[in-house]
Image (cartoon, rainbow, N blue to C red):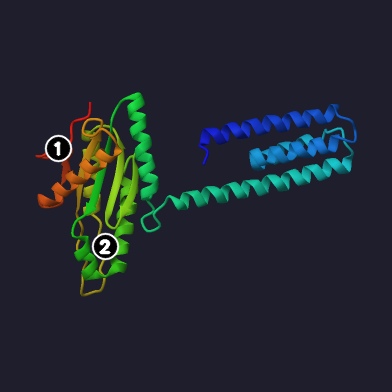
Amino acid sequence: MPGSRERANWRLGAALLALALYAAAWGAPADVRPAAALLGAVIATAAAGRAGGVVVALGAVVLPVAVPVRIALAVAALANGELHERHRRSARALAARSFTDRLTGLRNYDFFAEAMRAEVARVRRYGGCVTLLLLDLDRFKAFNDHHGHAAGNRLLAAVGRTIEREKRDADVAARFGGEEFAVLVPGRTTDAAVVAERLRAAIADISPGPVSRHDLSPGVTASAGLATFPVDARDPAELFELADRALYEAKRRGRDRTVTAADLVERPLRIAR
C-alpha cells in the first residue's frame, strides 16, 4: 500500500495532467475538444475528489465547446468528484477499522508492531530514544471468573478509553490481546515511567460498577514493564523481550508496580551500542 507521500505525489501528477488536458482542449480541433476536456475531468476528479469536481465544473463554464457539452461536463464532474470522495472516505474508514481493536478502540497488534519498527528505524537514523511500555491488568482472570466475561469486557473497554485519554498525543497505544496493553513512548525510560505511573493511577481509579446490588466489583490495578531502544535493546525483538521480562518481574514482585529493564537483576542481552 503506498504511503501518504506517494499518494500525494500521484494526486499532484494527476492534477497537473488533468490541467494540461484541459488546457489542450482550447487549442485542439473542435471535434477533439469535448473528449480532451472529459478526459481531464475524469483524471481531476479521481485525483482530487470533490475539490477536483468543483474546479472542473467551474472550468467548464469557459471551455470552447458547445453549451450543452459544458453543462454535461460540469454535472458529470461534480457527480464523479462526489463519488470519488465517498469512495476515499469509505476506504479510510475501512483501513482505520482494520487496525483498531473493536473492544477497546485502541490500535491492534499489527498496527503497533509496524509502528514500533518504524520508530526504531527513525531513532537509528536521527538519534534519540523510544521506550516500549507493556501494561498488564493484575488478576484479570480471577475478575473474569468471578464477574463473568461481559463484566470483563466492560472493564477492558474502560481501560482502553482510559489509556487513550491519559497517554500523550505522540504515544501509540494498542491492545496486544487479552488484558495486555502496549504503549510506544518517544523518549527515554524516565519519560515512559511518568506515562506508566499516570496510566496505572488512572486504571486504579476505574470503577467497573456493580454486577448486581449484592456484588460490588472491586477496582483493578496494573503492572508495567519498560525497555528503551537503543539503551537496553538492539532491535524491536530485543526491545519487546526486555519489556516483557520487566513486566514479568513487576508481577513477581507483587504486582501493581512499574519495573524497567535497568531494574532486572539478570540481563543476558548485551547493552546496545
According to the image, label 1 marks what residue? 268
Q: x, y (%) of residue 164?
A: 34, 48
Q: Tell me the kind of residue under disc 2.
A: Pro
* Residue 254 relative to residue 219: left or right: left
Q: Which quadrant would residue 13 be assigned to in this image? A: top right
Query: Which residue is at 33% across, 33% downward?
Result: 120
Q: x, y (%) of residue 228?
A: 24, 35
Query: Which residue is at 29% across, 60% downward?
Result: 155
Dot 1 or dot 2, earlier in sequence: 2
Q: Which quadrant would residue 46 be assigned to in this image? A: top right
Q: Secondary structure under badge 2?
A: loop
Q: CA distance from mark 1 to mark 2?
A: 40 Å
Residue 259 seen in render: yes
Which marked residue is nearer to the observer: mark 1 or mark 2? 1
Q: x, y (%) of residue 167?
A: 31, 43
Q: x, y (%) of residue 7?
A: 56, 36
Q: Residues within 10 Å of mark 1 (few under 14, many from 20)?
A: few
* Residue 125 relative to residue 11: left or right: left
Q: Residues within 10 Å of mark 2 (few under 14, many from 20)?
A: some
Q: Secondary structure under badge 1?
A: loop
Query: Which residue is at 32% across, 63% downward?
Result: 153
Mark linked to residue 208: 2
* Residue 90 relative to residue 54: left or right: left
Which of 138 and 214 lies nearest the eye of the viewer? 138
Quadrant containing the C terminus is top left
Query: Which residue is at 26% across, 62% downward?
Result: 208
